[in-house]
Image (cartoon, rainbow, N blue to C red):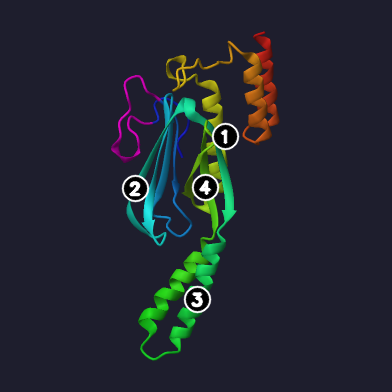
Amino acid sequence: MADQGSNLTTALPGGATLAPGETVLVADAFRFSTIAFYLRTELVLTNRRLYATRPNTFLGLIPVGTARSNFPIENVAGVNAGTRFDVLGVIFGVVGLIFGIGALMIPNAAIVAVPLILLGAASIISSPKQSIEVTNSGGGSIQFPVSLLERGRTLEFASRVAEAIARTPASGGRAAGGSPVVSEASDPSAALINLQRLKDQGLITADEYAAKRAEILGRL
């Protein structure tokens, strides 16, 4: 697992390069899913953007290309780790198991039955979904699937990204729409509100909250 720091890497996932003056703050790679453990979801936060890649798959197992996402850092409203249960995946898995077991009773149908049983079982096993969710300033979000077995790492990653974004002013000090970006130094009240939001979302501990709050108040 990568740690924070500007010397983490000199390139972005998929062969993309860093722009002049761009440095990496947080980077990590995660298994795409519990079943497709051989595939990777990669995310890199720099001082200018959040760059991510995830595999496109067929049936959740066979890679068929890579999807890339690029978020200017001033447009990233939040990064969270979430878990959901895929009901359709369970239904698909149960249907696959039923037809697969039924096919076993038909002479010479094992060539069809075995794949159905394997796909059904895989679908049920992978129905609990873990993801890293990036929310933009417009309220839209995109999810990057990761293995449920990496829940602890995804929570840690989301926390590190949130902390890094809170410390990093937008490039040039202005948002994409041209409006000034308010920093902690110029608007401590905004910094306190943002700090409270991080605490409420469980992205920082009570001790970290208290220390950062004292630091902001000390600048008043």
The residue that mark 1 highlights is 159
Residue of label 3: 97
Mark seen at residue 66? 2
Find residue 32 and report its horizontal and vertical position in percent: 44, 51
Indicate whether residue 19 is drawn in magenta: yes
Tag 3: Cα neighbours inside 10 Å, few (<14), some, or many (≥20)?
A: many
Q: Secondary structure at mark 3?
A: helix
- The vertical placement of 82 against 44, above or below, is below
Dot 2 or dot 1, earlier in sequence: 2
Determine contact: label 2, label 1, CB under 8 Å: no
- Image location (x, y in percent) of residue 162: 55, 31
The quadrant where residue 115 appears: bottom left
Dot 1: element:
helix
Quadrant of residue 71 within the rendered picture: top left
The residues bearing labels 1 and 4 have C-alpha atoms spaced at a distance of: 14 Å
Q: As drawn, which residue projects farthest toward the bottom?
A: 107
Side of 135 relative to 13 (left or right): right
Decide which of tag 1 and tag 4 comes sooner along the chain.
Answer: 4
What residue did someone put label 4 on? 131
**What residue type is disc 1 on?**
Ser
Magenta stretch mostly in which secondary structure?
A: loop
Kindly state the secondary structure of the residue where label 2 is placed: strand
Precedes in sequence: disc 4 or disc 2: 2
Above or below residue 88? Residue 33 is above
Point out residue 188 in the picture as x, y percentages from the top left corner. Answer: 64, 14
What is the spatial separation of the Cα atoms under label 4 and label 2, in whole angstroms?
A: 17 Å
Magenta residues (range)? 9-23
Q: Amino acid at mark 4?
A: Ser
Q: Residue at x 39, y 26 (%)?
A: 7
Image location (x, y in percent) of residue 204: 63, 31
